[in-house]
Amino acid sequence: MVAEHTVKAFDEDITRLRGLVAEMGGLAELSIAEAMDSLVSGNEELAKGVIARDKRIDQLEAEVDRLSVRVLALRAPMADDLREVIAALKIAGVIERIGDYAKNIAKRVGHIEGRKRFEPLTLLPVMNEMAGDMVHDVLTAYAARDAVAAAEIVQRDAKVDAFYDSVFRNFVSYMVENPATISSVAQLMFVARNIERIGDQATNIAEMVHYAATGTYLPEREDVPPPA
């Protein structure tokens, strides 16, 4: 009877952990979308909402940390269960960083001049959508413990990186041709870099999802531990 109660308590803890990670992920996804919307429109109130939301994401990460430590200390999980707890702990940390990147984008909103006629700004929403879709899909893979979907998401990061390289070259050319825009374009370069990092972090989550589901690393990562 004691063992049955222990198993039930552990299952409840795991469900709670997964729920916290899902809540964090949903907030991060919203922040990614709203940060770009606020940048394109110049809506500083929307940007402030993204910045404020980051505190809630941080709070949820702290809650995941506390619960994970408690589960590890009291339940002493093994094998699949241990990987499940470690994955939740690490993924929460990555989502927290994604929230920071969205917050960084939102903070640029008040620093873009001549927004309506500013060609470089039109390049970023597509890149942002690509990275945001990666985050959404990897969180779906996490919820389903879908190692195949996780592996596919890793491959998509190359497209975001290539888009970033193209955007960067366009920005440099634009600054050379329009010196008065250097300050604003520099802000957008910072934004593009943060979007690229969101894609990288989605890849990190995908690798963790694959490891948690299968106990094996993705082929190109066989010789390294799961990303921190």
Image (cartoon, helix red, strand yellow):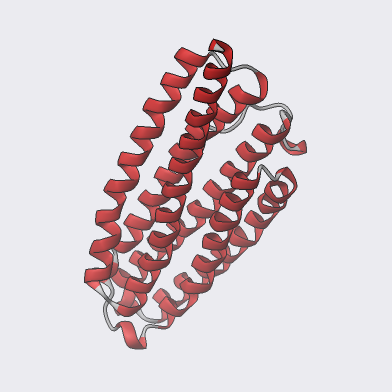
In the rendered structure, the answer to whether residue 78 lies left or right of residue 102 reads right
Name the residue at 40% across, 74% down: 175
The reply to whether residue 107 is visible in this rendering is no
In the rendered structure, the answer to whether residue 33 lies left or right of residue 2 reads left
Name the residue at 47% across, 35% down: 17
Residue at the farthest bottom position: 117
Q: Position of residue 188 (x, y in %)?
A: 38, 67
Question: Relative to the observer, which residue lies in front, 122 or 228?
Answer: 228
Question: Relative to the observer, which residue lies in front, 114 or 90?
Answer: 90
Q: Is residue 197 above or below residue 185?
A: above
Residue at the farthest front position: 1
Name the residue at 42% across, 66% down: 33
In the rendered structure, the answer to whether residue 154 lies left or right of residue 172 reads right
Q: Where is residue 127 in the image (x, y as percent from the top left)?
A: 53, 68
Residue at the farthest right position: 219
Q: Quadrant of residue 107?
A: bottom left
Q: Where is residue 1 in the image (x, y as percent from the top left)?
A: 56, 12
Q: Where is residue 94 in the image (x, y as percent from the top left)?
A: 47, 41
Numbered marks: total: 0
Question: Relative to the observer, which residue lies in front, 115 or 32?
Answer: 32
Q: In which quarter of the image is residue 108?
A: bottom left
Question: Relative to the observer, which residue lies in front, 121 or 182?
Answer: 121
The reply to whether residue 186 is visible in this rendering is yes
